[in-house]
Amino acid sequence: MAQQERAERTRRALINGAAKAIDLYGCEGASLAVICTAAGVTKGALMYHFPAKDDLIRAVRTEARQVITGALGVVPTSGIRPLQTAVDMTHAVAGRLGHDPVVRAGARLTREFVHYPDGSVSWSDAVREELAGALIGAPDPRGTAARLVYSLVGMDVCLRGEERRPGRSCGPLRGHLTRLWQLILPGILAAPQAVALYRAEGSSPYCAFAAVPDSVYPESVHPGPRI
């Protein structure tokens, strides 16, 4: 049992280390050496758990999708208007993008590989599906869901270009997302005056995720020149 636990801890460390490296440098720039340094393991341990880099990339993508699906799954829906649920879901995603390196790595991999060779579904697909379900009754729910995801990812990319700190807060992203909803809500509500019934900033504190401290990122994977 102890050996299995150690193996699982090593595997988790590799996925998290790979996510941090991919988040900062992209798939190509995240070399095996950088990933091992970020994970604090040897290259032999990496090859034991993930014989090929593609295996590790797939694991990061899968983990990102699971994290996002889990975050969306706990967004309250009982007694809440479906459209408010959609707003809250986007803020839940913004919180993860702001604080979770695995989700950020998943987003970057989706940008770099729109159609990944293994055919797996990206986390953004899962978000679009959940949002489309919550937007049923609004005009073009699937199209609106897609545009929200595109806008959310685009805002995060731009903000991270301005503020390249690994543990940055998701506050700025949620602020831009709130203003986006303030623009969108009047256009998708049958009665514009109904906007007052909704909270564009989200109806729950979905940004309550602990920021990743700088110490988690070894020196070799701090923001800097591409490796």
Image (spheres, rainbow, N blue to C red):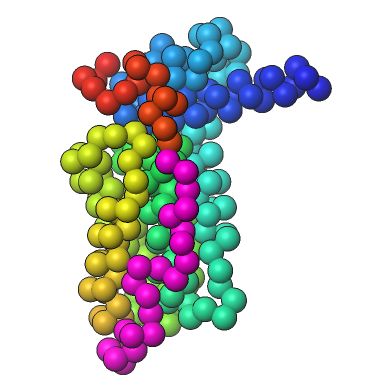
Q: Work out which residue is located at the far left of the displayed protein and give it.
A: 162
31 shown above or below 87:
above
Type of secondary structure dominating the magenta stretch: loop
Residue 77: percent from left, percent from top: 56, 73
In this rendering, the answer to whether 219 lies above or below 16 is above
Within the magenta stretch, is there residue 205?
Answer: yes
Query: Where residue 197 appears, x then y in whole percent?
Result: 38, 85
Which residues are drawn in magenta?
190-211
Quadrant in the picture for residue 148: bottom left
Q: Residue at x 74, y 22 (%)?
A: 4
Q: Is residue 200 visible?
A: yes
At horizontal 23% and vertical 22% (from top left) the residue drawn is: 224
Quadrant location of the N terminus? top right
Q: Position of residue 131 (x, y in %)?
A: 44, 66
Q: How many marks?
A: 0
Q: Which residue is found at the position 46% from the left and 59% from the top?
A: 206
Q: Position of residue 58 (x, y in %)?
A: 50, 32
Q: Is residue 51 magenta?
A: no
Residue at (35% x, 17% y) in the render: 219
- Of residues 101 and 201, which is closer to you in this image? 201
Name above or below for residue 127 compared with residue 224: below
Quadrant where the image shows the C terminus: top left
